Amino acid sequence: MKKLLMSLLLIFCIGCTFTLLNETNRNISAKSTKETIMIDAGHGGYDVGAESNYGDYEKNINLDIALLVGKQLKSYGHKVVYTRTSDSVSWSNDNTEDLQTRCDLANKKNADLFVSIHLNSSVYEANGYEIYCDFNNKNTVKLSNSILKQLDQLDYSTNRGLLDTNETPLYIVKNNKMDAILIEAGFISDDSDLYYLKNHTDNIATAIAVGIKKSLNE
Ligand SMILES: [Zn+2]
């Protein structure tokens, strides 16, 4: 009887160890599959981007949003890299070289995803947020819709939807090896959009980060 009990106990212990090992393996593989995300603050340095009626530069608001998006994604356990973290840029004043360097940086860092952050501008009355992505790429369409859904919840402007880069080619979507999207978070030329972008930057950034997280985790 004692022998039988000992045997049963041994089988139980082996079972427990096996389950524990399995659990550990699963945790390790879950961690190692976390995507590296390149956050690209549009423009910068010599290139100010669009300008508001009050002298705000797009490049600065893009950077504020980008850094906060990165911070949030890091807190979710993602590896985050940036094309720039300040107004000083590592590329020349040539526009093509500027954009190619951003793609090269993402490739060098083995990024799985490239998210470019910009603001729109128009001489006509226009507001809202929209996202450029390749409509033939299911991943980026899903990702972009997930971000739009989160931005909708902020209720700060109009959802202008998705734009297909097969119709409006974008350098960073076409020339990046990994999935890439470009977010236009609002119109710098619109007073209401501008107010929200400047005063609730953290809300915009959180919505983008949550949209990315949800899409990647699904
Ligand atoms: Zn821009």
Image: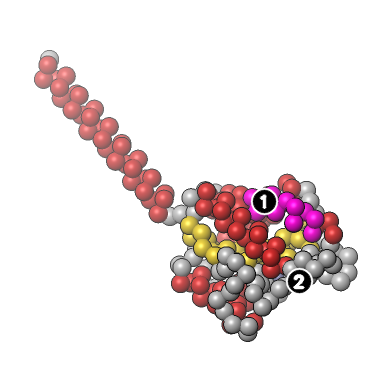
Question: Looking at the image, which residue is at 26% across and 32% down?
Answer: 15
Q: What residue is at 69 percent from the left and 49 percent from the top?
A: 203
Q: Secondary structure at mark 2?
A: loop
Of the numbered discs 2 and 1, the one sitting upstream in the chain is 2
Residue at point 78%, 48% (across, down): 155
- Magenta-highlighted residues: 194-207
Instruction: Label 1, secondary structure: give it.
Output: helix
The image's colouring method is secondary structure
- Residue nearer the viewer, 122 or 214: 122
Q: Is residue 125 left or right of residue 75?
A: right
Q: Contact, CB < 8 Å: mark 2 with mark 1? A: no
Residue receiving disc 1: 202
Residue 57 in the image: x percent, y percent? Answer: 74, 68
Q: Quadrant of ligand 1?
A: bottom right
Residue where numbered disc 2 is placed: 50
Residue 23: give x, y in percent of width and height.
35, 40
Q: Amino acid at mark 1?
A: Asp
**Disc number for residue 17:** none
Residue 154 position (above or below residue 173)? above
Q: Amino acid at mark 2?
A: Ala
Toward the bottom, the furthest residue is 94
